[in-house]
Amino acid sequence: MLNNQQKKVIIISLLFLISALLFYACTHRSKNQDLKRYVEKVKAETFKRLVVNKAKGQGIEEPVPVAYQAESLRSPFGEAGKANQASLAPKEKEANPLLAYSLSVLKFVGTLKQMGIIYAFVLAPDGVIYQVRVGDEINDRHGKVVSIKERELIVQEQLATGDNKNALRMITMQLKDGRQ
């Protein structure tokens, strides 16, 4: 019969042996080995087909860049079915909601060029995005949009000076990337 000391040695030896076998089984042959071999096989076969097809003059054609042309499409901002410029212009009787806000709280968020006219999109504090174009009034000081470029919106404001003269101030709003 075995004493306690011998039992402990046998148990420890068996645990060590089992651990070693499990470690060897897990590291000896990786599950990903089959996958790696398959990927290499597919790459080699694909390469062979490309070489053969290229020799036959049947290579893969390069994609041709296509410019997006929205001039012929209806305006997403006008009434359904109308694609004319009048549908983009604000109605004269409607008040301009952007006149209620200071320029410091408005955010320039994008542009759109359609039918040769470039529009800017301005986010107001109420969460609504408004469309403006050159000539529109935009803030509580009745600033006028004088230029819209792809990444900037320039607004001209008239400032009253102390000697009854008006001074002009140009404010440039930059388009910010969504990345932080």
Image (cartoon, rainbow, N blue to C red):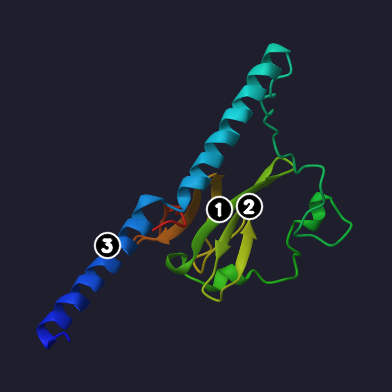
Specify the amino acid type for callout 3: Ala
**Where is 49 relative to 54, above or below?**
below
First in residue order: circle 1 vs circle 3:
3
Is residue 170 visible from the viewing direction of this image? no
Image coordinates for residue 122, horizontal then vertical, percent: 56, 61
Specify the amino acid type for callout 1: Val
Q: Mark 2, mark 3: which one is toward the viewer?
A: 3
**Where is 66 relative to 131, above or below?**
above
Quadrant where the image shows the C terminus: bottom left
Mark 1 vs mark 2, CA separation in Å? 7 Å
Circles 1 and 3, Cβ within 8 Å, touching? The answer is no
Residue at 67% over, 24% down: 49
Image-based side of 94 in relation to 110, left or right: right
Which labelled disc corresponds to residue 20? 3
Residue under circle 2? Answer: 133
First in residue order: circle 2 vs circle 3:
3
Specify the amino acid type for callout 2: Arg
Residue at 42% over, 66% down: 104
Circles 2 and 3, Cβ within 8 Å, touching? The answer is no
Residue under circle 1? Answer: 145
Which labelled disc corresponds to residue 47? none
Please tell me whether mark 1 sits on a helix, a strand or a loop.
strand
Q: Quick one: 28 or 62, which is closer to the camera?
A: 28
Please, which residue is most extreme toward the right here?
Answer: 81
Residue at 27% over, 62% down: 20
Quadrant where the image shows the N terminus: bottom left
Mark 2 vs mark 3, CA separation in Å? 74 Å
Image coordinates for residue 106, horizontal then vertical, percent: 49, 66
First in residue order: circle 1 vs circle 2:
2
Q: Residues within 10 Å of mark 2 (few under 14, many from 20)?
A: many
Residue at 55% over, 66% down: 123
